Image (cartoon, grey):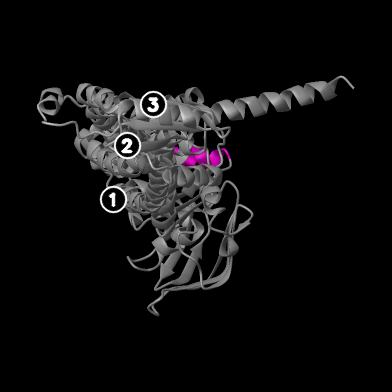
Amino acid sequence: MITFDKVSMRYGDGGTALTNISFEIKKGELAFVTGHSGAGKSTLLKLILAMEKSSGGQLIVNGVNVNRITRRRIPYHRRQIGTVFQDHQLLLDRTVFDNVALPLEIAGFDPRDAARRVRAALDKVGLLHKERLNPAKLSGGEQQRVGIARAVVNRPRIILADEPTGNLDPELSAEVMRVFEQFKSVGVSLLVASHDASLITSLHYRTLTLDHGRLVADQPELKHGQQAAR
Amino acid sequence: MASKPRAKQDRSLVRIHAIRQWLLTHGRVARSSGWRLLAQPGSSLLTAFVIAVSLLLPALLFALNSNLTQLLAEFRQDRQISLYLQDTLKETEGLQVSEDLLSRPDIAAVDFISSAQGLLEFSAASGLGEVLLQLPSNPLPATILVTPVSEEAALIDALATELGLHPAVALVQIDRLWRQRLQAISRLISVAGSGLGVIVVLGLFVIVGNTIKLAIENRRMEISVIKLVGGTDSYIARPFLYSGLFYGSVGGLLATVLQLIVLYLVNIPLRDLLKLYDSAFVLQGFDLSGAMLLILAGASIGWVAALIASLRHIWSLEP
């Protein structure tokens, strides 16, 4: 679903964000991207969303060559990807329900259909009873979960998450990861940027480690039998 | 074979569904844009008022011009030549002159107005009755109104010149001259109105464009979120286009109301003036099509201005 082939990314001021990155995320695969802050995790996600343009290499996402995508096609490309943002990017002039409904409204869903999906997504993150509230009234963790509901409401093929458990206690983090695992089990590919080492090691998923814009380690998913060895 | 018509039916159902969906989406966006404007009634009304006043100026000029044109059309029927007779002439002599004129083949009708009759009519029409009657002598000459057979300006001119040579005639006046002056004034107003119209349209583009630009700036955060979850540029621009449309149409409506008020206020003294001229002229500008045109002009200017502003400012944001 996501193929990086020798992708490099340089900023206009000459700073290098990513160097020669190659990896592939398959359908139904969940992978963590980890590394110190500024290692290039967010840049990696931005490239996938076509928020930034790479300066070299080839990036194929969901069959789309993102390097050569036209401005007109970018919105349709993003509709295939559910994104959980670090600063959750919720709109404070509308309710939780309307925030989650936004991607469906943009895609032109029938309002009744959309309402059903929104409630299902909110139920999945345990916030159905707060659909009428303004996101500003919610705690940081709840806001993060609204962001997750918005990312999954469109049933995307790919989910990107930038520090989705950043504001959450361990129990809620585990809850969020369980939601992600449900999507993985129905064939969604997930890429989760996180520096939450304890969460990553407890889950044994594939882990890509970035250091100063280079991919320094690609730890494959550990099967049940291998867990002891780790 | 049986599946073919069904497939066709399905396709048309899908199309109907898509059109319905499109209409619903637009209705929703239009409503929410409307509410957004109503949430700030003061500034929205102010913008609409500025648009209204800008539209009012050329609209009034065009109204003035169409009234002038109509007035001219009325006078076109009226190809009279006025002959003012020497004031030494007696009334019977004047009548004799007019009867002589009537026998000419190129004159269709004559109307003799004695100086006494003229004074009576004028004092009644002008409201200066008492004053005029107190004058020691009648200042008005006897007049013969000549209606030529021909409608051609050159022939009327020739006739007027010839009649001017008649010893009983002191002065010849053709109505055509001041009709020509009115026509020239009408052309001038038309040109000025068009020029002002162009300036006003440009000004409105700036006003509406700037309002929309500010609205876009205020909703930058929302726009960036919408972009991140897959909103197209046209989806983002849509509410702003509706805002421009609403500003423009409300501005047009306000301009119509203002124009009505102005014309009503002008109509009162104008009626008295026209009574003096004994004219059947009725002031134009109250008609529905003119009002519709003004509203339509406002709406389209608002929409196009919003479109230009959206293209410029939304396009410049990060994709």
The residue identified by callout 2 is B251
Q: Secondary structure at mark 3?
A: helix
Residue B113 in sight: no
Residue B100 visible somewhere in the drawing: yes
Image coords of residue A25 (percent x, y): 57, 56
Q: Position of residue B60 (x, y in %)?
A: 33, 39
Q: Main secondary structure of the magenta part?
A: helix
Q: Which mark is residue B95?
A: 3
Select label 1 or label 2 by which is in front.
Answer: 2
Give the side of residue B42 with respect to residue B56, left or right: left
Amino acid marked by disc 1: Leu
The amino acid on which the numbered mark 3 sits, given as a three-letter code, is Leu
User: Pointer 1: what residue?
Assistant: B214
Residues packed near mark 3 inside 10 Å, few (<14), some (14 to 19) or many (20 plus): some
Compare marks 2 and 3 and give the one earlier in the sequence: 3
Give how far apart the Cα atoms at labels 3 and 1 are.
78 Å
Chain bearing mark 1: B
In the image, which residues are magenta? Answer: A175-186
Which of the two labelled residues, at mark 1 and mark 2, occupies the earlier sequence position?
Answer: 1
